[in-house]
Image (cartoon, rainbow, N blue to C red):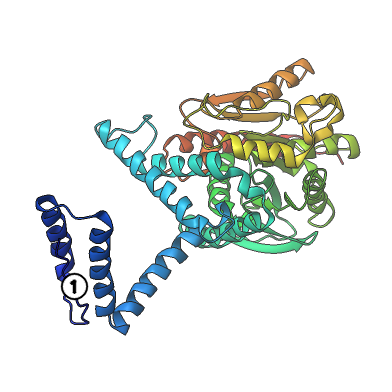
Amino acid sequence: MRCDCYVVRRSFPTHALPAMVSVVTKSSSRHPIPLDKALRLLRSRVIALLLNLNGAKLRGMVLRGGSVYAFFALMLGGFYDKPWELVEVASRMSFTIVRAIAAYVARGCKPLYPGWTLPFEVTRAVIRCSMSVYGDRLLVPSNAQFVRTQSEWVGTALGFLSSWQMGTKTEAFHHNGLEHMWVRNAKRSVTPNTRRFVVLYYHGGGFAVLSPRMYIHFANEMQTRIAKMLHEQLGDHEDDTSIQVEILLANYRKLPEYQYPVPPEDAYKMYEYLLHVEKVSPNQIVLAGDSAGGSLAMSTLIRIRDQQPTQPLGAFLSCPFVDLEVGGDERRVPHCLIGDKASDAIYTAYHPRNGPPSTWGDASPVHCDLQGLPPVYIQAAELDYILPHAQNLYAKAKADGLTDWTLDVHKEVPHVFTTFPTSIIRAADKGLDDMARFAATQFADSIRRPQCA
């Protein structure tokens, strides 16, 4: 068989490559040639294409490729260890997005649940994939720090827009070597005559990631709703012009650098900060938190009861992580955010589960004595990976004789659904209102209650 030789020239037209590949394929079907010769022929055409690229085109390709890589590195920095792993992570996430959109279209462009939207479905799918497949990587120190920093950038930007829209202001300050955030009404200033009512909030993130800044938008929602409901509850019987509702987004040292008992110790120090530095009375404070932050709020309540003469007004918890004895199974809750890899890594890193649960201290508040604690509103989600935590906490409170605790399970929503914008999950609106109403009621009752001299 005669073998023709091909000369590679710089003037080879790039648009001819598809045609050349087609010719090779067709000619091979008429006169079969060895595979190695076909590959050499195709390789020569590819080399010709590369030689035809001038410097400007090559720089453009590198710039575009680098920009795409940088974008995915910024978005997915907490889920890979080596640079080349980013390609696999980005591919999997892209497939997850396409699959979520395809499922939405296949349902006739109807959401999976009535209160959901397509943006929320896509967001939930991406978070679930990352937690299920790569969740354990969040406990790598460099990855955890990256996600914390990333949440600070994103939270600052979104918080600025949210504060402008809702008429609030933020103020950062440092205490215990950490940055914390105040969220207040921008139109009211704090004076010696101001009656300050504070929600001390501990953010979630598996004790490892996120930051107070990521919760500025959430805090704006809570501050606005609580202030409005407090005004409605007081009516014309109280002058509320001197009342200021504030949210303190408290920070704490995190996994994997700092294990239990450091996070709850930091949480308790922020309560002491309110008492001794800000001079806020316990009857003007409500504690709160979501997920891991809910655990810290519970730990703080228990420590206050054991160490302080007066307790705060109460606490509201969103999907609290409070029972180290209860594991999870992501197959049981396919539409939640949390996955087994993330959950297992958090359980292992936060506190060893050796010995009887009664020896775990307030790392597992469900196994603590809850007698004598103030009212607590527990908000749970039907589709939550850790729904049993909330149910077990409420059952333990009832067993300990507490009659002023409430368990409110919201239907067809996943873990910490109220931390998402109400524009993408409408059920969050009611969840925010329910938590705000609890806090406003505690504040209103405190105002009406006769004060001891």
Q: Quadrant of the C terminus?
A: top right
In the depicted structure, whether residue 208 falls above or below residue 425:
below
Which residue is the site of mark 1? 5
Report the residue at 43% width, 48% height from top: 93
Task: Locate residue 61, reporting x and y percent.
Answer: 34, 73
Of the pair 313 and 187, the residue shown nearer to us: 313
Of the pair 152 and 100, the residue shown nearer to us: 100
Q: Is residue 208 visible?
A: yes
Task: Locate residue 57, reporting x and y percent.
Answer: 29, 79
The total of numbered circles placed on residues is 1
Q: Is residue 369 visible?
A: no
Q: Quadrant of the N terminus?
A: bottom left
Question: Horizontally, is 389 left or right of 300 in the view?
Answer: left
Q: Amino acid at mark 1?
A: Cys
Question: Horizontally, is 38 left or right of 320 in the view?
Answer: left
Task: Locate residue 83, reporting x and y percent.
Answer: 53, 61
Question: SS class of the residue under badge 1?
Answer: loop
Of the pair 271 and 77, the residue shown nearer to us: 77
Of the pair 97 and 198, the residue shown nearer to us: 97
In the depicted structure, whether residue 168 falls above or below residue 290:
below
Report the residue at 59% width, 40% height from top: 230
